[in-house]
Amino acid sequence: MRKKLLKNCRLYLVLDKKAAGTKDLISLARLAIEGGIDILQLRWKDKKNRIVLKVGKELRKVTKEANVLFIIDDNIDLANTLDADGVHLGQEDLPIKKGRAILGSEKIIGCSTHTISQAKKAVSEGADYISVGPIFKTPIKADYKAVGLKFFKRVRQETELPVFGIGGIGLNNVKEVIKSGADRVAVVRAIVNATDPKMNAARLKEELNKT
């Protein structure tokens, strides 16, 4: 069921605690869901913070009610505890094969990729989707060089898996990203830092639905 839903997902929100600052994550999630997001990832690097579990439980409830996929960044233990739909792994996180051994075959595993070889490796190791980026320079990943749209198009042609463009994508450039061949994008600030998160989500989804 989870993986069937993934095939039709277009708009992916990374609900990043650092980017959100003092904003209420539950309220942001509800607004984004009302706007049309298909996947919500909780990215909260402070794994020892007890509040993470409390917020995660509420987000699991909200996403399940809305039939929105719920992904946990990096933390497989938290993903299991919350019965999340899956986990997203970076290049420095647990290898995909080990993650699969812990999570099982039904849960979703996504992987961040920044090179062609990383993308191919993620596919070969059994990732269910990959993200490619940062497409544009972004303060969220300040240490990473932007890979650009041509690179994204190359990776997109390498696999039949869902491929999400990520990094600096917003209403100002989403049409450009779509023209490069993207039919799925992941965003952070475009929704989390928006004056009207619901409206921004809806407008992004509208553009993606044109593809």
Image (cartoon, rainbow, N blue to C red):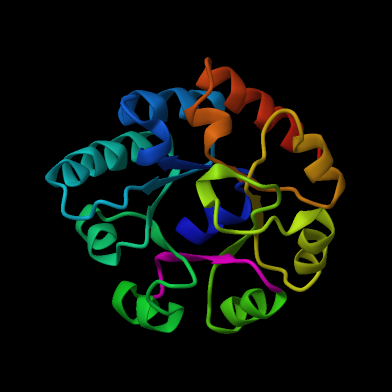
Residue at horizontal 79%, vertical 44%?
A: 177
The one nearer the camera, 21 or 195, is: 21
Q: Relative to residue 68, is residue 130 depicted above or below?
A: below
Q: Would you say residue 112 sits in the magenta stretch?
A: yes
Q: Relative to residue 23, is residue 149 depicted above or below?
A: below
Q: Would you say residue 123 sits in the magenta stretch?
A: no
**Quadrant of the rendered image containing residue 72:** bottom left
Residue 38 spot, x, y in % from top left: 53, 41
Q: Relative to residue 55, is residue 97 depicted above or below?
A: below
Residue at horizontal 52%, vertical 15%?
A: 195
156 with respect to 118 (left or right): right
Q: Residue furthest front?
A: 143
178 with respect to 32 (left or right): right
Residue 123 spot, x, y in % from top left: 61, 77
Residue at horizontal 53%, vertical 20%?
A: 198
Q: Is residue 1 visible?
A: no
Q: Residue furthest left?
A: 50
Residue 149 spot, x, y in % from top left: 80, 54
Quadrant assignment for the C terminus: top right
Residue at horizontal 43%, vertical 36%?
A: 19
Q: Is residue 181 visible?
A: yes
Circle count:
0
**Quadrant of the rendered image containing residue 115:** bottom right
The one nearer the camera, 136 or 163, is: 136
The one nearer the camera, 118 or 68, is: 118
Residue range corresponding to the magenta coloring: 105-115
Residue 89 spot, x, y in % from top left: 44, 66
Q: Relative to residue 71, is residue 62 depicted above or below?
A: above
